[in-house]
């Protein structure tokens, strides 16, 4: 277990290093942030001063070395635009994104699992066929477009739900959350459902496949032969085994939800880190871009690791590989 | 779907079956009503997009044909000289129906080209990996695993943040995000095929490795690859639209569907829904149609299901 953890951490560090070199080097090849930030009336002297203050006058390798040294001290550089530490900017916005992703995940499970179980129990029924057609539709709906349509229907025409922002937040252990106020909830429903839609389809399909497969196994027949009620067979015996593959998926999808929040946040003006990165790419705010990518990669890596460990606990047949 | 057809044709020539697998697959595909619907829709869209200069009522990017006075007209309106704006116009007075046809050209180009390049690169790497085995295989598959554990949009973001905007750049970013799917798929089937008797036979005839790899093993691994490719094309088109919508994909000079939708977003809150709605609908229909074909192909060819 310890060897496994160490090798995974080493792998994550290596991934982070490769990515930071890639992004750092790459960003230096694309446009000059000074051109974007300075007004066209700036004098050459002002220009030089700005370049110097950002440390852009040094060779790229030296810039990277400085970045690396600071990064190890937990300093990912100051944003060119906000003139605040990039890390602070992102951490400020992280709760909003995590809240959105988490609520979307819960929605996907609460809607997807029952539908998937139903479709798996009666694969030939009309309702099941409709559910599966819906899931193809869910896979195909462009998230950003369906978000627009939802705003159009629920905010513009019906006027039921707000189209943008986060609403009132309550501080829970110092973290601002929308989940516990009415206005916050109203703001959360549309974006979270928008983000969840794609995942609902996925959960339906995996649950259905699992249920169909499990229903044919001997132990289910045996449970029936024992005279257990159908509800108990399905809810306890079948569902439990179906949930195992779901754990992996949930883990992977949580990472993907955090990344795809970029889209939903842009549409619903949700003040999370996804909106920050899109704005930062537009103005070439390198420290923020780099910090966002590094932090997201770390988060995804941690989630993946936790999922792998959980998986080995839930399913004893799975053994964690010790060697990298 | 021309890429798909040529792939299966080659499989048909090389595979040692008595009935051409291509014909069998196509027959099954045409029997499936949903798949048939998908094929018809995709064909219509591709033909309309390719022939856009002939089919579209207007060249939406020829400024001399636009009239700013016709800006933001509702669907079904007419221009001063009687031309019908079937789906309305955008803020520049551009006929949306024409703009969608032209936009589809770019979306289809990016989707098919990126999926095609990723297929060639990914399949080559996967095939090579399965064939050489050992440490090289382990190392390559570790890279694939790591890459697939990250959300595709994150990888696309990384590359677009570095590369900037442009058709070539978004294709490159999409190839980078997708090759690993093909590599993993083909490696899985190649590992199984490698142990089959016909490969043994080919080896005993002292055929060169390259020939065994491409003429014997590859054709027998095509089925799952085709299924993955179909799904990936749809996904690539969607991802391109998403990235362009976010303003980090294609430049404004390459108005794909995503950019049309982004443009309409500004007018949506004032009730001019059509500028965003119809390009999105076109995108949705295209993606659903491709996915319907992919779904049917998956059932017909029945490869190992993706976990």
Image (tube, rainbow, N blue to C red):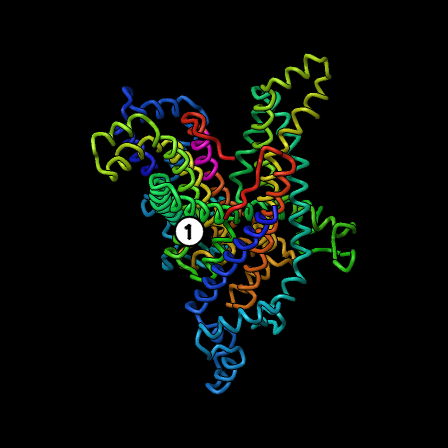
- Quadrant in which residue B68 is drawn: bottom left
Q: In which quadrant of the rendered image does the N terminus of chain B lie?
A: top left
Query: x and y percent of residue A311 in the render?
Result: 61, 39
Q: How many marks?
A: 1
Horizontal side of residue A207 vs B51, given as left or right? right
Q: Which residues are magenta?
A: B286-295
Horizontal side of residue A302 vs A24, given as left or right? right
Q: Main secondary structure of the magenta part?
A: helix
Give the crowd class for mark 1: few <14, some 14-19, many >=20 residues within 10 Å. Answer: many
Residue at x-position 61% and y-position 69%: A73
Is residue A6 magenta-colored?
A: no
In front of the other: B20 or A233:
A233
Residue denoted by label 1? B176
Horizontal side of residue B202 vs B154, given as left or right? left
Give the structural element (helix, strand or loop) at label 1: helix
In front of the other: B99 or A193:
A193
Residue at x-position 43% and y-position 29%: B303
Residue at the limit of the structure toward the bottom, as seen here: A45
Query: x and y percent of residue B239 in the render?
Result: 48, 48
In front of the other: B12 or B211:
B211
Query: x and y percent of residue A194 in the render?
Result: 61, 45
Q: Chain of mark 1?
A: B
Horizontal side of residue B144 vs A143, given as left or right? left
Q: Is residue A34 above or below residue A119?
A: below
Is residue B57 visible to us here? Answer: no
Is residue B138 visible to us here? Answer: yes
Query: x and y percent of residue A82 in the render?
Result: 61, 71
Q: Is residue A288 above or below residue A139?
A: below
In front of the other: A214 or A88:
A214
Residue at x-position 42% and y-position 29%: B297
Is residue B289 magenta-colored?
A: yes
């Amino acid at each position: 277990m310890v060897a496994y953890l160490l090798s995974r951490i080493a792998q994550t560090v290596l991934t982070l290093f490769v990515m930071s070199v890639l992004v750092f080097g790459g960003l230096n090849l694309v446009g000059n942030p000074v051109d974007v930030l300075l007004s066209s009336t700036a004098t050459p002297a002002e220009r030089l001063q700005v370049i110097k203050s950002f440390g852009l006058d040094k060779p790229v390798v030296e810039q990277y070395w400085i970045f690396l040294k600071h990064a190890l001290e937990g300093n990912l550089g100051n944003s060119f635009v906000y003139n605040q530490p990039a890390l602070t900017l992102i951490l400020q916005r992280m709760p909003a994104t995590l809240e959105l992703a988490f609520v979307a995940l819960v929605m996907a499970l609460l809607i997807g699992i029952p539908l998937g179980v139903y479709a798996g129990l009666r694969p030939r029924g009309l309702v099941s066929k409709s559910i599966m057609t819906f899931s193809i539709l869910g896979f195909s709906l462009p998230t950003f477009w369906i978000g627009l349509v939802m705003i159009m229907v629920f905010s513009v025409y019906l006027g039921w739900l707000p189209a943008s922002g986060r609403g009132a937040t309550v501080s829970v252990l110092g973290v601002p959350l929308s989940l516990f106020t009415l206005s916050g909830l109203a703001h959360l429903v549309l974006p979270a459902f928008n983000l969840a839609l794609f995942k609902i389809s996925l959960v339906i399909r995996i649950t259905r496949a699992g249920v169909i497969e499990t229903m044919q196994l001997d132990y289910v027949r045996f449970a029936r032969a024992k005279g257990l009620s159908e509800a108990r067979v399905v809810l306890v015996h079948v569902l439990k085994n179906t949930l195992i593959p779901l754990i992996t998926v949930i883990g992977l999808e949580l990472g993907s939800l955090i990344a795809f929040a970029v889209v939903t946040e842009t549409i619903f003006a949700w003040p999370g880190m996804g909106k920050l990165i899109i704005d930062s790419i537009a103005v070439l705010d390198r420290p923020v871009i780099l910090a966002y990518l590094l932090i997201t990669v770390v988060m995804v890596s941690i989630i993946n690791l936790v999922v792998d460990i959980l998986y080995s606990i839930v399913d004893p047949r799975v053994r964690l590989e010790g060697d990298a | 779907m021309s890429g798909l057809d040529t792939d299966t044709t080659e499989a048909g020539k090389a595979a040692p079956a008595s009935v051409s697998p291509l014909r069998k697959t196509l027959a099954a595909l045409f029997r499936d009503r949903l798949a048939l619907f998908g094929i018809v829709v995709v064909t219509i869209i591709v033909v309309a997009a390719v022939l856009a200069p002939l089919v579209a009522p207007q060249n939406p990017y020829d400024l001399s044909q636009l009239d700013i006075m016709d800006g933001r007209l509702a669907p079904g309106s007419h221009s001063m000289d009687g031309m019908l704006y079937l789906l309305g116009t955008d803020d520049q007075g551009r006929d949306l129906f024409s703009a969608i046809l032209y936009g589809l050209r770019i979306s289809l180009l990016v989707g098919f080209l990126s999926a095609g390049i990723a297929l060639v690169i990914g399949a080559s790497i996967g095939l090579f990996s399965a064939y050489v085995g050992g440490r090289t295989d382990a190392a390559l598959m570790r890279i694939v695993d790591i890459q697939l554990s990250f959300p595709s949009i994150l990888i696309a973001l990384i590359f677009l943040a570095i590369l900037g905007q442009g058709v070539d750049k978004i294709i490159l970013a999409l190839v980078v995000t997708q090759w690993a799917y093909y590599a993993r798929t083909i490696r899985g089937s190649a590992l199984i095929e490698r142990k089959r008797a016909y490969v043994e036979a080919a080896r005993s005839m002292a055929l060169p490795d390259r020939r065994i790899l491409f003429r014997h093993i590859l054709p027998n691994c095509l089925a799952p690859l085709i299924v993955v490719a179909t799904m990936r094309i749809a996904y690539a088109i969607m991802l391109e639209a998403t990235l362009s919508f976010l303003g980090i994909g294609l430049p404004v000079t390459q108005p794909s569907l995503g950019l049309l939708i982004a443009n309409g977003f500004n007018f949506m809150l004032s009730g001019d829904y059509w500028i965003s709605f119809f390009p999105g609908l076109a995108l949705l229909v295209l993606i659903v149609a491709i996915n319907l074909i992919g779904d049917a192909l998956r059932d017909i060819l029945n490869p190992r299901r993706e976990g």
